Amino acid sequence: MLTLKIHITPKGWIKPPSRARCIAQASSNAASPVTHPLSLLQWLVTTQGASPLDLKVERTFRGEDLGYGLIATQEINPEDTILSVPLSSALTSEGASETEWSIHMAENILRVIKHGENTPWLDSLPKNINLPWLYWSSEEVAEFQELDTINEAYNLRTVFDTAVQRLCSGGNGNGNTAQYRPAEVAYALSLVHSRSFLSSGVHVWVPGVDLCNHNGEKANATVRCIHNPDVCQGSAATEEIAPPQMNSTPRPSIFELVAGEQGIQKGEEVTISYGKWPNDVFLLLFGFIPKGNEYDGLVLFQNLDEIVEFIAGVIAQGTGVEAESIDPIKDTDSRKQWYTELSKELSAGGEEEEGAVSVDIENDYTRMVLTPSGIDYRLLEGVGACLKLFVASTLASGAFHDVESCDAHKIEKNEEFLQALNVPILIATRCQQVLAGFSTSLEDDEKAVETARGNYKTALEYRIGKKRILHSALAHFILQAQ
């Protein structure tokens, strides 16, 4: 049985602050805020160089669940540019490492707020984004009942802890007080993580475009980043051949929101896809779970080592031999030999065939998943290859003959059990094992969610999705195993 060991930190997690309070606290030493008569989109066009001038969208409140969004005020033709914003008006992670990009951007937005630059963009920001790793209690996070996601929430929590150490310290040695409060840092991080795009290795938060809500496969718009060719690699070499005009003005890099192939009707919301992510990513980074997300998934095995350990356990339970006695990766030398054979088995075309493709099994076979609509092909390949080698190595090792209680009849039965194992049986067994590791059943959760509220309801919806994937796969592979 798979048992979840949940680490509950004694340190309480902070509650979501209001946006108004954060801005008021951060700008306490700044000039008095100025109320801007311009709307966000008007401000982008008139002061930030955004285009087109005749915008066909407006910012509109879409309800408590969605917040604000962009609504088409006129019909928008297919592939028309809806909004084009210079990257000079965006916040980016340029210059920051990938491990600290969000801290870098959070500090920048807090600095803007602190200096009293109360633009319509700041006025348009949501009150907070309820990210579990920032605002949920440890007990609420534990309600995921899935160790992988719980651990990821705690890993992300270290980003906040690092940011607090850096931005909320006691000053710089000159007697200055702390720059920001933890609640302000949490607020900034929640915005940065939920409203940034990744483009060419750089995280970008674009005013105006950040209003677009996610609509998965039904999205009617896309985003793209067009970089200034003058700053691209190769521009220096090009200029040696054809020097640029002396008076030419460099074109800025821009970020564009573009209508899809079907166009957008008047009154329709402009939506994009945040990516083909499982619910884990959406909840931890964006603060919501998309309804009917076909890209949700459940990791059945983290790597091939887990598959080997699992198959050894199944054989041990079914035959009475010690799992350790048939473990092919119990030491470094054995593991190296096993993985050499496994790599041959998994290589496309097989080692003996011309044109065989080598497989990096340490990296290519990680996080093998089940989805609502199917199964990761690597899972089938990995379990199949491990089982094939397991059967051969176990029979060759004479492990069944070494068990004192095994007579000839028992040995024959054990060998029959081993040879009867197949991929559907093993995957169905693994599904049962993972389901047994949850502290509640799918039926219990579906009943509880009807009356649940707040973060507990969200956690229920999250784990219900995972359990439904497991039950669906279990039914499928039980049929295949018969």
Image (tube, helix red, strand yellow):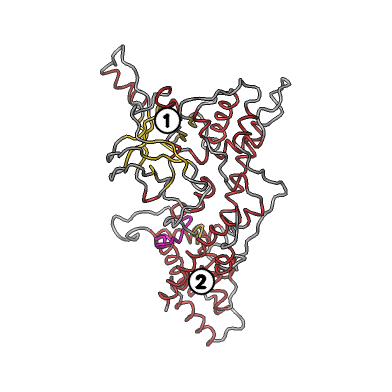
Q: Quadrant of residue 112?
A: top right
Q: Front-most of 358 and 71?
A: 71
Q: Is residue 50 left or right of residue 440?
A: left
- Identify residue for label 1: 41
Q: Position of residue 224 (x, y in %)?
A: 36, 36
Query: Could one spot residue 341 in this view of the protein?
Result: no
User: In the picture, which quadrant includes the N terminus?
Assistant: bottom right
Q: Front-most of 198 and 446?
A: 446
Residue 371 colored in magenta in the image: yes
- Please state the extent of the stretch shown in magenta in the rendering: 365-378
Q: Amino acid at mark 2?
A: Thr
Q: Secondary structure at mark 2?
A: helix
Residue occupying image coordinates x 52% and y 45%: 285
Q: Secondary structure at mark 1?
A: helix
Q: Is residue 27 above or below residue 277?
A: above
Q: Residues within 10 Å of mark 2 (few under 14, many from 20)?
A: some
Instruction: Please give the label number shown on residue 249.
Output: none
Q: Is residue 198 left or right of residue 107?
A: left
Q: Nearer the viewer, mark 1 or mark 2?
A: 1
